[in-house]
Image (cartoon, coloured by chain):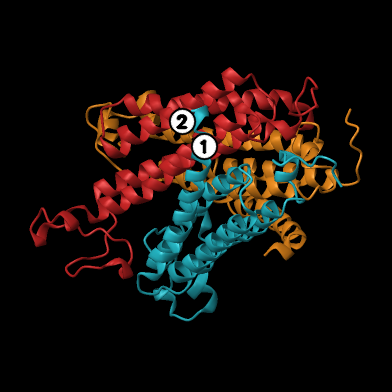
Chain colours: A cyan, B orange, C red
Amino acid sequence: MSTNSSQMPSARELYSLDNPIFCCYVFWATVLVAKMLLMSTLTAVQRFRYKLLGLVPLGLRRKIFPNQEDLFFKNTEVQFNDPHVERVRRAHRNDMENILPYFIMALIYISTNPDATVACNLFRVASVARLVHTLVYAVYPVPQPARVIAFASMQLITFYMAAVVALRTLRFI
Amino acid sequence: MSTNSSQMPSARELYSLDNPIFCCYVFWATVLVAKMLLMSTLTAVQRFRYKLLGLVPLGLRRKIFPNQEDLFFKNTEVQFNDPHVERVRRAHRNDMENILPYFIMALIYISTNPDATVACNLFRVASVARLVHTLVYAVYPVPQPARVIAFASMQLITFYMAAVVALRTLRFI
Amino acid sequence: MSTNSSQMPSARELYSLDNPIFCCYVFWATVLVAKMLLMSTLTAVQRFRYKLLGLVPLGLRRKIFPNQEDLFFKNTEVQFNDPHVERVRRAHRNDMENILPYFIMALIYISTNPDATVACNLFRVASVARLVHTLVYAVYPVPQPARVIAFASMQLITFYMAAVVALRTLRFI
């Protein structure tokens, strides 16, 4: 479609859906964004759990809303230290600490026009690893080292991309 | 201006100020970035409030600095549980949980070359909703469901963009 | 290399390694991403410190793991309020609050095709300031105002970029 057939593709192809690497990045970034937004829902579910299900007597129900205006029910107080809620919030914070820098790192990694097979598989492994991380941390806690391995996978992939990019752009320090 | 008049505009037009959709994204992303940075200022204002205004007797003044080296005043201690400061910090964290993924999601949504009217209005509604969210959460707390509605607006818009993008790029899984 | 010699370069040049401004952004963004990821490592180091070094008697060793499944050692309990660990976590959170919005702001600032000298020096100063911020906050705490100055440097640079971008795109409100 384009008559520009230079060896080094221009940004036009790099950051468009004509570039399979960018498409792969876009797909998996979308999955991770959706996953991160669902963490808010999961936190809310943990806050309401016994309330909605009515599984426990009134006096023992969870009371875990952080703001005065969130107390939809009588017999509740502002509270911050429920272990189930805090576990989901730690998993969510860990997502922000790792996935958000990955989004930027992978995006600028594409500008180096990497090998398509390598790049796409890096995106796939990193993204699936974070899905596993959420499962074993926030949904169904399992013994270590499951979470450490899932955590390290995206971490190492991000460092690899950082090394590739830094070597390419080192003279612009 | 450009002689390239193909049906599917290239990235050249998509990610440049020649593209009105990108301009609209850029403007509202800038507003949201500025808003997020002002949350740090709002936290600092809450930390210093009574100190600077001198409204309360010395013994009752706020003592809400998290680090030893931040204790500019005598008669203060390290403290973490002031409700006014913690409210602003929760609002700030909620911003990070929602606005930062939105930035990436909206950016890659532009690569699908969406309808300009739809895309620009999505950016506008999502951004104004988050401004409202900050007002009703951190500046002047009002009863629910004001905050839930503001929160859900950007959440749903981000999910809509994610669905559009995922369907377009599903074969690159 | 390109025959396109218009006054206003297109996105093709703006978001590619042909554009020195983008290269400079990419290099320093990579440095900041790597720095942010190392904060997780620094937190883990603080959690394990005395354990690994064996510097203190068993009864006085740190017990600072947030999850039940993280208790690799006997004689430990779940704990959240160790001052050394919490200091690194506050520094990490401050990174997320400031560096992640900067990534987006600087990226869209490039779309305005700014003067190369100005833009590159803004990227350099902001990035080095955050490296200093981490040193004086999390690695070797020093008295204020060292941290406030480092914090304000990136904050002001981000606001400057926001002002430039907002003025250019104001009619797309």
Q: Position of residue C78 (x, y in %)?
A: 27, 64
Q: Residue visible at 40% across and 70% down?
A: A146
| Direction left: furthest residue | C57
In the rendered image, which residue does mark 2 sit on?
C127
Residue C75 placement: quadrant: bottom left
Q: CA distance from mark 1 to mark 2?
A: 8 Å
Type of the residue with mark 1? Ala
Q: Is residue A114 above or below residue C134?
A: below
Which is more toward the observer, B88 or C173?
C173
Q: Is residue A139 left or right of residue C16?
A: left
Task: Report helix, strand or loop for mark 1.
Answer: helix
Residue C140: x and y in percent read 25, 35
Q: Position of residue C159 (x, y in %)?
A: 56, 26
Give the amino acid type for the residue marked by disc 2 in the picture: Ser
The answer to whether mark 1 and mark 2 are in CB contact below 8 A is yes
**Residue C86 seen in the current view:** yes
Disc 1: CA contacts within 10 A as few (<14), some (14-19) or many (>=20):
many
Q: Assess disc 2: are there few (<14), some (14-19) or many (≥20) residues with their C-alpha within 10 Å of its C-alpha.
A: many
Which residue has dot 1 on it?
A: C29
